[in-house]
Image (tube, rainbow, N blue to C red):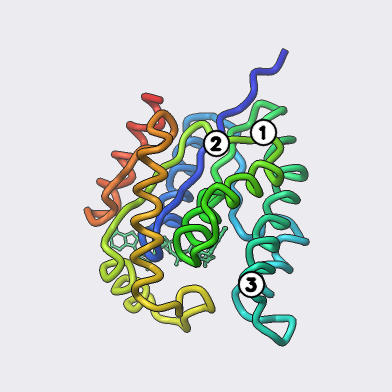
Amino acid sequence: MTTRGKFITFEGPEGGGKTTQAKRLVERLQAAGQPVVYTREPGGTPTGEAIREILQHNKAGEAPCAETEVLLFAASRAQLVRHVIIPALERGDWVVCDRFADSTTAYQGYGRGFSVEQMIAINEFAIDGAQPDLTILLDLPVSDGFARLQQRGGKKDRIESEALDFHERVRAGYLELAQRWPERFRIVDPRGELGAVAEEIWKLVRRD
Ligand code: T5A
């Protein structure tokens, strides 16, 4: 019987280096001979990528209201779980996902002010039991994350453009989630040199 693969998610406020570190981890796992699928949220499937355009760039020609936003993130996730994540894990592949369900709890729950328990319940419906085995929370002060994004250049998307106090609530929310599920969350400070942060993550992945 094939052993189920390991499911690792990267979470955190803006600009922490989730994409950079998730891709580094994938390269390292591949070099070690571990089959691994990299994916991201919102997105990761044709339906999810279309939803991403609506959520980030108002592709439908109007900004989604807050309730629609919650449900679109959940819809993208439901599709990704059933079409990509569960099949990969059942093959025995590992999955590294750049943001997942905790993003909805942090951004729409703590950030927008919806009930955290309601966000968790919606996530449970969307993910059908596909809980991550390990969640790397790249935690850094909001201003440091935005300074990095500014250096990278490009236009802020709809959610990045939210006020500073929204992003402060998101960060604090993530830290509460890490306390709530200490067996799953590992907090990493991503402000060090890129290679050193990658090394710390690699040690956590090998240990857990
Ligand atoms: N969202 C998402 C919700 O509200 N609810 C949800 O349920 C979900 C799933 C997604 C947006 O949607 C929201 C959250 C987001 O606002 P996105 O474009 O996927 O949008 O945005 P992020 O996931 O936040 O990705 P970012 O690109 O903004 O940030 P990352 O991925 O954390 O950072 P990364 O790797 O792109 O790095 C940023 C810059 O920093 C540099 C990189 O080179 C890059 O230039 N960097 C470093 N520089 C120095 N030292 C290091 N150690 C560095 N690491 C990275």
Mark 2: which secondary structure?
Answer: loop
Residue at point 44%, 33% (across, down): 184
Please report contact status of discs 2 and 1: CB closer than 8 Å, yes or no: no
First of labels 3, 2 by sequence position: 3
Give me the C-alpha separation between circle 3 and circle 2: 24 Å
131 or 21, which is in the foreground?
131
Callout 1: 10 Å neighbours few (<14), some, many (20+)? Answer: few
The spot of residue 176 in percent (x, y) is 37, 46
First of labels 1, 3 by sequence position: 3
Residue type highlighted by circle 3: Leu
Query: Which mark is nearer the camera, 2 or 1?
Result: 1
The spot of residue 163 in percent (x, y) is 39, 78
Ligand 1 closer than 8 Å to label 3 CB: yes
Q: Quadrant of the N terminus?
A: top right
Q: Quadrant of the C terminus?
A: top left
Mark 1: which secondary structure?
Answer: loop
Give me the C-alpha separation between circle 1 and circle 3: 25 Å
Ligand 1 closer than 8 Å to label 1 CB: no
The spot of residue 181 in percent (x, y) is 43, 35
Question: In the drawing, does residue 190 fall left or right of residue 64?
Answer: left
Residue type highlighted by circle 1: Gly
Q: Residue furthest left?
A: 192
- Name the residue that disc number 2 marks: 132
Residue at point 34%, 78% (across, down): 150
- Name the residue that disc number 3 marks: 55
